[in-house]
Image: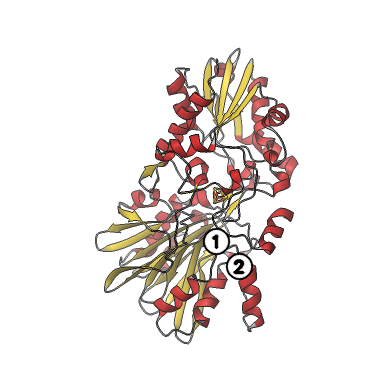
Amino acid sequence: MLAEIKGLNEECGVFGVWGHPDSAQLTYYGLHSLQHRGQEGTGIVVSNGEKLRVVKGEGLVSEIFTANVMEELKGTSAVGHVRYATAGGGGYENVQPLLFHSQTGSLALAHNGNLVNANYLKHQLETQGSIFQTSSDTEVLAHLIRRSGFSQIKDQVKNALSMLKGAYAYLILTENELMVALDPHGLRPLSLACLGDAYVVASETCAFDVIGAEYIRDIRPGELLIINKDGITSEQFAFNSTKSICAMEYIYFSRPDSNIQGINVHTARKNMGKRLAVEAPIEADVVTGVPDSSISAAIGYAEATGIPYEMGLIKNKYVGRTFIQPTQSLREQGVKMKLSAVRGVVEGKRVVMVDDSIVRGTTSRRIVRLLKEAGATEVHVVISSPPIKNPCFYGIDTSSKEELIASDKSVEEIRQLIGADSLTFLSAEGMVGAIVKTEGTNGFCLGCFTGNYPTEIYPDTLQYYYQK
Ligand code: SF4
Protein backbone atom coordinates (compact mmCIF):
# COMPACT_ATOMS: atom_id res chain seq x y z
CA MET A 1 0.00 0.00 0.00
CA LEU A 2 1.08 3.55 -0.49
CA ALA A 3 2.13 5.03 2.80
CA GLU A 4 1.58 8.62 1.96
CA ILE A 5 -2.06 8.15 0.95
CA LYS A 6 -2.87 5.50 3.47
CA GLY A 7 -1.93 7.35 6.63
CA LEU A 8 0.46 4.72 7.91
CA ASN A 9 4.02 5.88 8.06
CA GLU A 10 7.30 4.66 9.40
CA GLU A 11 9.23 7.41 11.05
CA CYS A 12 12.85 6.66 10.43
CA GLY A 13 15.73 4.57 9.23
CA VAL A 14 19.30 4.62 10.52
CA PHE A 15 22.60 3.56 9.00
CA GLY A 16 26.14 3.68 10.38
CA VAL A 17 29.67 2.73 9.31
CA TRP A 18 32.81 2.31 11.38
CA GLY A 19 36.33 1.98 9.98
CA HIS A 20 36.01 2.59 6.24
CA PRO A 21 37.61 5.41 4.20
CA ASP A 22 34.40 5.82 2.18
CA SER A 23 32.11 5.88 5.19
CA ALA A 24 30.00 8.81 3.94
CA GLN A 25 29.51 7.31 0.47
CA LEU A 26 28.54 3.96 1.97
CA THR A 27 26.09 5.77 4.24
CA TYR A 28 24.63 7.54 1.22
CA TYR A 29 23.94 4.20 -0.48
CA GLY A 30 22.62 2.70 2.75
CA LEU A 31 20.24 5.60 3.32
CA HIS A 32 19.10 5.41 -0.26
CA SER A 33 17.97 1.83 0.26
CA LEU A 34 16.21 2.87 3.51
CA GLN A 35 14.40 5.75 1.83
CA HIS A 36 11.03 3.98 2.16
CA ARG A 37 11.33 4.49 5.95
CA GLY A 38 11.24 8.27 5.67
CA GLN A 39 11.24 10.78 2.84
CA GLU A 40 10.98 14.13 4.56
CA GLY A 41 14.48 14.72 5.83
CA THR A 42 17.89 13.11 5.84
CA GLY A 43 21.36 13.69 7.20
CA ILE A 44 24.85 12.27 7.52
CA VAL A 45 27.42 13.00 10.21
CA VAL A 46 30.96 11.92 9.42
CA SER A 47 33.98 11.68 11.71
CA ASN A 48 37.60 11.94 10.62
CA GLY A 49 38.78 10.94 14.09
CA GLU A 50 39.12 14.53 15.23
CA LYS A 51 35.98 16.35 14.23
CA LEU A 52 32.37 15.56 13.40
CA ARG A 53 30.85 17.19 10.36
CA VAL A 54 27.14 17.20 9.50
CA VAL A 55 25.16 17.70 6.32
CA LYS A 56 21.40 17.43 6.51
CA GLY A 57 18.26 18.84 4.98
CA GLU A 58 14.61 18.39 4.21
CA GLY A 59 14.17 16.18 1.18
CA LEU A 60 15.19 12.87 -0.32
CA VAL A 61 18.66 11.38 0.01
CA SER A 62 19.40 12.05 -3.67
CA GLU A 63 18.25 15.67 -3.31
CA ILE A 64 20.29 16.53 -0.23
CA PHE A 65 23.51 14.68 -1.00
CA THR A 66 24.65 16.00 -4.34
CA ALA A 67 28.06 15.09 -5.74
CA ASN A 68 29.52 18.36 -4.44
CA VAL A 69 28.19 17.77 -0.95
CA MET A 70 29.53 14.23 -0.88
CA GLU A 71 32.98 15.52 -1.85
CA GLU A 72 33.10 17.40 1.45
CA LEU A 73 32.11 14.49 3.65
CA LYS A 74 35.42 12.79 4.39
CA GLY A 75 36.02 10.46 7.29
CA THR A 76 36.26 6.85 8.37
CA SER A 77 33.04 6.62 10.36
CA ALA A 78 29.58 7.97 9.75
CA VAL A 79 25.97 7.80 10.86
CA GLY A 80 22.98 8.66 8.72
CA HIS A 81 19.26 9.00 9.07
CA VAL A 82 16.11 9.22 6.97
CA ARG A 83 13.09 10.78 8.63
CA TYR A 84 9.36 10.90 8.30
CA ALA A 85 8.17 13.81 10.41
CA THR A 86 5.42 13.10 12.92
CA ALA A 87 6.30 13.03 16.62
CA GLY A 88 8.03 16.29 17.35
CA GLY A 89 6.94 17.69 13.99
CA GLY A 90 8.89 18.53 10.88
CA GLY A 91 11.35 21.33 10.21
CA TYR A 92 15.07 21.44 9.57
CA GLU A 93 15.96 21.48 13.26
CA ASN A 94 14.38 18.06 13.74
CA VAL A 95 16.22 16.44 10.82
CA GLN A 96 18.74 13.93 12.14
CA PRO A 97 21.44 13.05 13.00
CA LEU A 98 21.45 15.67 15.74
CA LEU A 99 24.93 16.98 16.49
CA PHE A 100 25.97 18.29 19.91
CA HIS A 101 29.22 19.87 21.03
CA SER A 102 30.60 20.12 24.55
CA GLN A 103 33.96 20.64 26.21
CA THR A 104 34.50 16.89 26.38
CA GLY A 105 33.82 16.34 22.68
CA SER A 106 31.06 16.04 20.12
CA LEU A 107 28.21 13.60 19.82
CA ALA A 108 25.89 12.75 16.94
CA LEU A 109 22.59 10.94 17.47
CA ALA A 110 20.44 9.08 14.98
CA HIS A 111 17.25 7.53 16.32
CA ASN A 112 14.61 5.22 14.91
CA GLY A 113 11.55 4.83 17.13
CA ASN A 114 9.68 6.89 19.62
CA LEU A 115 10.10 7.38 23.36
CA VAL A 116 6.95 7.18 25.46
CA ASN A 117 8.40 9.11 28.40
CA ALA A 118 10.08 11.88 26.39
CA ASN A 119 7.78 14.63 27.66
CA TYR A 120 8.20 13.50 31.24
CA LEU A 121 12.00 13.48 30.89
CA LYS A 122 12.02 16.80 29.03
CA HIS A 123 10.02 18.41 31.79
CA GLN A 124 12.44 17.10 34.39
CA LEU A 125 15.47 18.21 32.38
CA GLU A 126 14.04 21.67 31.76
CA THR A 127 13.40 22.21 35.45
CA GLN A 128 17.09 21.36 35.94
CA GLY A 129 18.15 23.98 33.39
CA SER A 130 18.26 22.16 30.05
CA ILE A 131 17.22 24.08 26.95
CA PHE A 132 16.13 22.05 23.94
CA GLN A 133 17.01 23.03 20.37
CA THR A 134 14.44 20.71 18.76
CA SER A 135 10.99 19.34 19.45
CA SER A 136 12.26 15.83 18.70
CA ASP A 137 12.31 13.25 21.51
CA THR A 138 15.78 12.20 20.36
CA GLU A 139 17.46 15.19 21.95
CA VAL A 140 16.50 13.94 25.40
CA LEU A 141 19.19 11.25 25.18
CA ALA A 142 21.95 13.80 24.52
CA HIS A 143 21.00 15.74 27.65
CA LEU A 144 20.82 12.61 29.76
CA ILE A 145 24.23 11.49 28.52
CA ARG A 146 25.90 14.82 29.27
CA ARG A 147 24.20 15.18 32.65
CA SER A 148 25.26 11.73 33.80
CA GLY A 149 27.86 11.85 36.55
CA PHE A 150 29.98 9.07 35.04
CA SER A 151 33.38 9.82 33.57
CA GLN A 152 33.41 7.22 30.77
CA ILE A 153 31.17 7.81 27.75
CA LYS A 154 30.13 4.14 27.79
CA ASP A 155 28.81 4.47 31.36
CA GLN A 156 27.18 7.81 30.57
CA VAL A 157 25.32 6.23 27.66
CA LYS A 158 24.28 3.14 29.62
CA ASN A 159 23.00 5.28 32.45
CA ALA A 160 21.07 7.53 30.06
CA LEU A 161 19.55 4.61 28.16
CA SER A 162 18.29 3.07 31.38
CA MET A 163 16.01 6.11 31.84
CA LEU A 164 14.33 5.83 28.46
CA LYS A 165 11.03 4.05 27.82
CA GLY A 166 9.64 3.19 24.44
CA ALA A 167 11.13 2.22 21.11
CA TYR A 168 14.63 3.18 20.14
CA ALA A 169 17.31 2.03 17.82
CA TYR A 170 20.09 4.56 18.45
CA LEU A 171 23.33 5.20 16.64
CA ILE A 172 25.68 7.43 18.64
CA LEU A 173 28.84 8.70 16.98
CA THR A 174 31.68 10.47 18.75
CA GLU A 175 35.04 11.45 17.27
CA ASN A 176 36.40 7.98 17.96
CA GLU A 177 33.54 5.61 18.76
CA LEU A 178 30.32 4.32 17.27
CA MET A 179 27.75 3.11 19.78
CA VAL A 180 24.66 1.18 18.85
CA ALA A 181 21.75 0.63 21.23
CA LEU A 182 18.41 -1.14 20.96
CA ASP A 183 15.55 -0.74 23.45
CA PRO A 184 14.84 -3.56 25.95
CA HIS A 185 11.93 -4.83 23.84
CA GLY A 186 13.73 -4.68 20.51
CA LEU A 187 10.71 -2.93 19.01
CA ARG A 188 12.52 -1.68 15.91
CA PRO A 189 14.79 -3.79 13.70
CA LEU A 190 18.54 -3.15 13.79
CA SER A 191 21.26 -5.34 12.32
CA LEU A 192 25.05 -5.56 12.22
CA ALA A 193 27.23 -6.44 9.23
CA CYS A 194 30.87 -6.24 8.18
CA LEU A 195 32.53 -4.94 5.05
CA GLY A 196 36.12 -6.16 5.13
CA ASP A 197 37.44 -4.81 8.43
CA ALA A 198 34.69 -2.20 8.69
CA TYR A 199 31.44 -2.57 10.64
CA VAL A 200 28.08 -1.50 9.33
CA VAL A 201 24.77 -1.09 11.18
CA ALA A 202 21.37 -0.56 9.58
CA SER A 203 17.65 -0.55 10.27
CA GLU A 204 17.20 -3.12 7.54
CA THR A 205 19.43 -5.70 5.93
CA CYS A 206 18.54 -4.49 2.41
CA ALA A 207 20.98 -1.65 3.13
CA PHE A 208 23.80 -4.19 3.54
CA ASP A 209 23.12 -5.82 0.21
CA VAL A 210 23.47 -2.56 -1.71
CA ILE A 211 27.03 -2.01 -0.43
CA GLY A 212 28.06 -5.67 -0.40
CA ALA A 213 28.31 -5.92 3.40
CA GLU A 214 28.02 -9.30 5.06
CA TYR A 215 25.27 -9.71 7.65
CA ILE A 216 26.56 -10.77 11.08
CA ARG A 217 23.53 -10.69 13.37
CA ASP A 218 20.64 -8.61 14.71
CA ILE A 219 21.22 -6.32 17.69
CA ARG A 220 19.68 -7.85 20.83
CA PRO A 221 17.03 -6.11 22.93
CA GLY A 222 18.74 -4.08 25.67
CA GLU A 223 22.16 -4.38 24.02
CA LEU A 224 24.78 -1.66 23.67
CA LEU A 225 27.48 -2.27 21.06
CA ILE A 226 30.62 -0.19 21.23
CA ILE A 227 32.81 -0.07 18.14
CA ASN A 228 36.19 1.66 18.24
CA LYS A 229 39.84 1.12 17.26
CA ASP A 230 40.05 -1.82 19.65
CA GLY A 231 37.23 -3.68 17.91
CA ILE A 232 33.69 -4.36 18.95
CA THR A 233 32.31 -5.06 22.43
CA SER A 234 28.79 -5.87 23.54
CA GLU A 235 27.12 -5.08 26.85
CA GLN A 236 23.59 -5.40 28.15
CA PHE A 237 22.28 -2.17 29.59
CA ALA A 238 18.89 -3.74 30.36
CA PHE A 239 18.57 -7.19 31.84
CA ASN A 240 14.79 -7.54 31.97
CA SER A 241 14.60 -7.38 28.19
CA THR A 242 11.85 -9.27 26.40
CA LYS A 243 11.66 -9.23 22.66
CA SER A 244 8.57 -7.55 21.18
CA ILE A 245 9.45 -6.68 17.61
CA CYS A 246 6.91 -4.54 15.78
CA ALA A 247 4.72 -6.88 13.70
CA MET A 248 4.10 -4.02 11.25
CA GLU A 249 7.71 -4.25 10.13
CA TYR A 250 6.88 -7.65 8.61
CA ILE A 251 3.38 -6.72 7.44
CA TYR A 252 4.09 -3.44 5.78
CA PHE A 253 7.13 -1.29 6.54
CA SER A 254 10.27 -3.21 5.78
CA ARG A 255 11.39 -3.91 2.27
CA PRO A 256 10.59 -7.43 1.00
CA ASP A 257 14.28 -8.10 0.41
CA SER A 258 15.15 -7.40 4.06
CA ASN A 259 15.49 -10.11 6.68
CA ILE A 260 14.40 -9.37 10.24
CA GLN A 261 15.68 -11.82 12.83
CA GLY A 262 16.65 -14.16 10.04
CA ILE A 263 13.17 -14.16 8.49
CA ASN A 264 12.79 -12.79 4.98
CA VAL A 265 10.04 -10.16 4.82
CA HIS A 266 8.70 -11.29 1.43
CA THR A 267 8.48 -14.89 2.67
CA ALA A 268 6.68 -13.79 5.85
CA ARG A 269 4.16 -11.81 3.79
CA LYS A 270 3.67 -14.68 1.37
CA ASN A 271 2.97 -16.98 4.31
CA MET A 272 0.43 -14.45 5.62
CA GLY A 273 -1.32 -14.73 2.25
CA LYS A 274 -1.30 -18.52 2.55
CA ARG A 275 -2.80 -18.31 6.05
CA LEU A 276 -5.46 -15.96 4.73
CA ALA A 277 -6.38 -18.58 2.15
CA VAL A 278 -7.08 -20.97 5.03
CA GLU A 279 -8.92 -18.41 7.15
CA ALA A 280 -10.77 -16.77 4.23
CA PRO A 281 -11.36 -19.18 1.33
CA ILE A 282 -13.25 -17.33 -1.41
CA GLU A 283 -14.58 -18.41 -4.79
CA ALA A 284 -13.11 -15.98 -7.28
CA ASP A 285 -11.51 -15.68 -10.73
CA VAL A 286 -8.40 -13.59 -10.01
CA VAL A 287 -6.27 -12.50 -7.05
CA THR A 288 -4.60 -9.11 -7.10
CA GLY A 289 -2.42 -7.32 -4.57
CA VAL A 290 -2.36 -3.61 -3.81
CA PRO A 291 1.13 -2.50 -4.86
CA ASP A 292 3.76 -2.65 -3.54
CA SER A 293 3.65 -4.07 -0.03
CA SER A 294 0.66 -6.42 -0.55
CA ILE A 295 1.94 -8.22 -3.62
CA SER A 296 3.83 -10.87 -1.64
CA ALA A 297 0.71 -11.75 0.39
CA ALA A 298 -1.39 -11.82 -2.79
CA ILE A 299 1.05 -14.26 -4.39
CA GLY A 300 0.79 -16.47 -1.28
CA TYR A 301 -3.01 -16.33 -1.34
CA ALA A 302 -3.08 -17.22 -5.05
CA GLU A 303 -0.60 -20.05 -4.60
CA ALA A 304 -2.58 -21.58 -1.74
CA THR A 305 -6.00 -21.28 -3.39
CA GLY A 306 -5.03 -22.05 -6.98
CA ILE A 307 -6.77 -18.84 -8.15
CA PRO A 308 -4.50 -17.12 -10.66
CA TYR A 309 -2.54 -14.06 -9.50
CA GLU A 310 -2.97 -11.14 -11.88
CA MET A 311 -1.75 -7.58 -11.93
CA GLY A 312 -5.15 -6.00 -11.46
CA LEU A 313 -3.78 -2.77 -10.01
CA ILE A 314 -0.90 -0.69 -11.33
CA LYS A 315 1.03 1.90 -9.39
CA ASN A 316 2.11 5.09 -11.09
CA LYS A 317 5.76 5.20 -10.06
CA TYR A 318 6.30 8.74 -11.28
CA VAL A 319 4.07 10.59 -8.87
CA GLY A 320 6.49 12.61 -6.79
CA ARG A 321 6.39 13.72 -3.20
CA THR A 322 4.69 16.94 -4.22
CA PHE A 323 1.49 14.95 -4.32
CA ILE A 324 1.72 13.89 -0.70
CA GLN A 325 -1.15 15.82 0.76
CA PRO A 326 -2.31 15.65 4.34
CA THR A 327 -5.97 16.54 3.98
CA GLN A 328 -8.63 13.90 3.59
CA SER A 329 -10.00 15.24 0.29
CA LEU A 330 -6.57 15.41 -1.31
CA ARG A 331 -5.70 11.98 0.03
CA GLU A 332 -8.66 10.62 -1.92
CA GLN A 333 -7.44 12.37 -5.04
CA GLY A 334 -4.00 10.92 -4.36
CA VAL A 335 -5.31 7.38 -4.68
CA LYS A 336 -6.54 8.07 -8.22
CA MET A 337 -3.21 9.55 -9.23
CA LYS A 338 -1.19 6.73 -7.79
CA LEU A 339 -3.20 3.63 -8.65
CA SER A 340 -5.04 2.38 -11.70
CA ALA A 341 -7.14 -0.74 -12.15
CA VAL A 342 -6.30 -2.87 -15.19
CA ARG A 343 -9.60 -3.26 -17.02
CA GLY A 344 -8.33 -6.09 -19.21
CA VAL A 345 -7.59 -8.13 -16.07
CA VAL A 346 -10.59 -7.43 -13.85
CA GLU A 347 -13.49 -6.79 -16.24
CA GLY A 348 -16.23 -9.38 -15.75
CA LYS A 349 -14.18 -11.08 -13.00
CA ARG A 350 -14.72 -11.88 -9.33
CA VAL A 351 -11.62 -10.30 -7.77
CA VAL A 352 -9.87 -11.05 -4.49
CA MET A 353 -8.05 -7.85 -3.54
CA VAL A 354 -5.28 -8.50 -1.00
CA ASP A 355 -4.09 -5.57 1.09
CA ASP A 356 -1.79 -5.45 4.10
CA SER A 357 -3.92 -3.28 6.40
CA ILE A 358 -6.78 -0.84 6.67
CA VAL A 359 -6.12 2.42 8.51
CA ARG A 360 -8.82 5.01 7.82
CA GLY A 361 -10.64 2.97 5.19
CA THR A 362 -10.61 5.81 2.68
CA THR A 363 -8.00 4.20 0.47
CA SER A 364 -9.66 0.78 0.55
CA ARG A 365 -12.97 2.34 -0.48
CA ARG A 366 -11.31 4.12 -3.39
CA ILE A 367 -9.53 0.99 -4.59
CA VAL A 368 -12.68 -1.14 -4.40
CA ARG A 369 -14.42 1.55 -6.44
CA LEU A 370 -11.55 1.63 -8.97
CA LEU A 371 -11.85 -2.12 -9.47
CA LYS A 372 -15.63 -2.00 -9.84
CA GLU A 373 -15.46 0.93 -12.25
CA ALA A 374 -13.04 -1.17 -14.30
CA GLY A 375 -15.67 -3.91 -14.55
CA ALA A 376 -15.00 -6.27 -11.63
CA THR A 377 -18.27 -8.07 -10.83
CA GLU A 378 -17.30 -8.77 -7.21
CA VAL A 379 -14.46 -7.40 -5.04
CA HIS A 380 -13.54 -9.46 -1.99
CA VAL A 381 -11.07 -7.67 0.27
CA VAL A 382 -8.72 -9.79 2.35
CA ILE A 383 -6.31 -8.10 4.74
CA SER A 384 -3.06 -9.77 5.79
CA SER A 385 -3.21 -8.34 9.34
CA PRO A 386 -5.84 -7.93 12.07
CA PRO A 387 -7.91 -4.71 12.32
CA ILE A 388 -5.88 -1.70 13.57
CA LYS A 389 -7.92 -0.52 16.53
CA ASN A 390 -5.35 1.48 18.51
CA PRO A 391 -2.63 4.05 17.88
CA CYS A 392 1.07 3.20 17.92
CA PHE A 393 3.25 4.96 20.50
CA TYR A 394 6.52 3.57 19.19
CA GLY A 395 7.31 5.50 16.05
CA ILE A 396 4.68 4.44 13.54
CA ASP A 397 2.23 7.10 12.54
CA THR A 398 -1.04 5.13 12.54
CA SER A 399 -3.32 8.19 12.89
CA SER A 400 -5.32 9.03 16.00
CA LYS A 401 -7.72 6.49 17.47
CA GLU A 402 -10.72 8.43 16.14
CA GLU A 403 -9.38 8.21 12.59
CA LEU A 404 -8.81 4.46 12.72
CA ILE A 405 -11.83 2.93 11.06
CA ALA A 406 -11.60 -0.30 13.08
CA SER A 407 -11.43 1.49 16.43
CA ASP A 408 -15.21 1.61 16.75
CA LYS A 409 -16.58 -0.32 13.80
CA SER A 410 -17.24 -4.01 13.25
CA VAL A 411 -15.83 -5.88 10.26
CA GLU A 412 -19.31 -5.86 8.69
CA GLU A 413 -19.61 -2.10 9.18
CA ILE A 414 -16.20 -1.58 7.58
CA ARG A 415 -17.17 -3.85 4.68
CA GLN A 416 -20.21 -1.73 4.01
CA LEU A 417 -18.23 1.50 4.23
CA ILE A 418 -15.57 0.37 1.76
CA GLY A 419 -18.15 -1.16 -0.58
CA ALA A 420 -16.60 -4.64 -0.73
CA ASP A 421 -18.56 -7.85 -1.35
CA SER A 422 -16.75 -9.46 1.55
CA LEU A 423 -14.03 -8.44 3.98
CA THR A 424 -11.74 -10.65 6.02
CA PHE A 425 -8.84 -9.79 8.31
CA LEU A 426 -6.10 -12.26 9.21
CA SER A 427 -6.15 -13.32 12.87
CA ALA A 428 -3.30 -12.21 15.15
CA GLU A 429 -2.32 -15.86 15.76
CA GLY A 430 -2.45 -16.58 12.04
CA MET A 431 -0.30 -13.58 11.29
CA VAL A 432 2.39 -14.37 13.84
CA GLY A 433 2.26 -18.06 12.90
CA ALA A 434 2.88 -17.05 9.29
CA ILE A 435 5.99 -15.14 10.34
CA VAL A 436 7.61 -17.48 12.85
CA LYS A 437 5.77 -20.79 12.41
CA THR A 438 5.08 -21.13 16.12
CA GLU A 439 1.94 -21.09 18.23
CA GLY A 440 0.94 -17.99 20.19
CA THR A 441 1.98 -14.38 19.66
CA ASN A 442 5.05 -14.11 21.92
CA GLY A 443 7.99 -12.09 20.70
CA PHE A 444 5.91 -9.49 18.85
CA CYS A 445 4.41 -6.12 19.61
CA LEU A 446 0.77 -6.24 18.51
CA GLY A 447 -0.24 -3.09 20.38
CA CYS A 448 -2.12 -1.38 17.56
CA PHE A 449 -4.16 -4.55 16.99
CA THR A 450 -4.77 -5.73 20.54
CA GLY A 451 -4.25 -2.64 22.72
CA ASN A 452 -1.66 -4.56 24.76
CA TYR A 453 1.59 -2.62 24.60
CA PRO A 454 4.95 -3.96 25.74
CA THR A 455 5.78 -0.84 27.80
CA GLU A 456 3.81 1.38 30.10
CA ILE A 457 2.43 4.43 28.28
CA TYR A 458 2.79 7.77 30.04
CA PRO A 459 -0.41 9.82 30.43
CA ASP A 460 0.83 12.81 28.40
CA THR A 461 1.82 10.48 25.57
CA LEU A 462 -1.64 8.92 25.65
CA GLN A 463 -3.23 12.34 25.55
CA TYR A 464 -1.11 13.40 22.58
CA TYR A 465 -2.00 10.34 20.52
CA TYR A 466 -5.67 10.38 21.32
CA GLN A 467 -6.03 14.05 20.47
CA LYS A 468 -3.64 14.60 17.58
S1 SF4 B 1 1.82 -0.70 18.18
FE1 SF4 B 1 1.66 -1.63 16.12
S2 SF4 B 1 2.87 -0.32 14.75
FE2 SF4 B 1 3.42 0.21 16.87
S3 SF4 B 1 5.24 -1.01 17.35
FE3 SF4 B 1 3.46 -2.18 18.05
S4 SF4 B 1 2.90 -3.47 16.27
FE4 SF4 B 1 4.27 -1.88 15.53
Image-quadrant location for residue 329: top right
Q: Quarter of the image containing the C terminus?
A: bottom right
Nearer to the camera, 30 or 278: 278
Q: Residues within 10 Å of mark 2 (few under 14, many from 20)?
A: many
Name the side, left or right, on which 404 lies relative to 346: right
Nearer to the camera, 456 or 17: 456
> Do the residues under discs 1 and 2 have CB atoms within 8 angstroms?
yes
Q: Which residue is mark 1?
A: 166
Nearer to the camera, 106 or 444: 444
Q: Residues within 10 Å of mark 1 (few under 14, many from 20)?
A: many
Q: Which residue is mark 2?
A: 118
x and y, in percent, of residue 216 in the image? 30, 55
- Residue lying at the far top of the rendered structure: 348
Q: Secondary structure at mark 2?
A: helix
Q: Quarter of the image containing the N terminus?
A: top right
Q: Name which residue lies at 38% across and 49% down.
A: 261
Q: Name which residue lies at 47% across and 29% down.
A: 275
Q: Name which residue lies at 68% across and 58% down.
A: 462
Name the side, left or right, on which 384 lies relative to 264: right
- Res. 362 in view: yes
Image-quadrant location for residue 240: bottom left
Residue 286, numbered circle? none
- Res. 135 in view: no
Give the residue type that dot 2 points to: Ala
Image-quadrant location for residue 347: top right
x and y, in percent, of residue 379 in the image? 62, 21
Name the side, left or right, on which 4 lies relative to 419: left
Measure the C-alpha gap from mark 1 to mark 2: 9 Å
Check mark 1 vs ligand 1: CB closer than 8 Å? yes or no.
no
User: On screen, 214 above or below 355?
Assistant: below
Give the residue type that dot 1 points to: Gly
Q: Secondary structure at mark 1?
A: loop
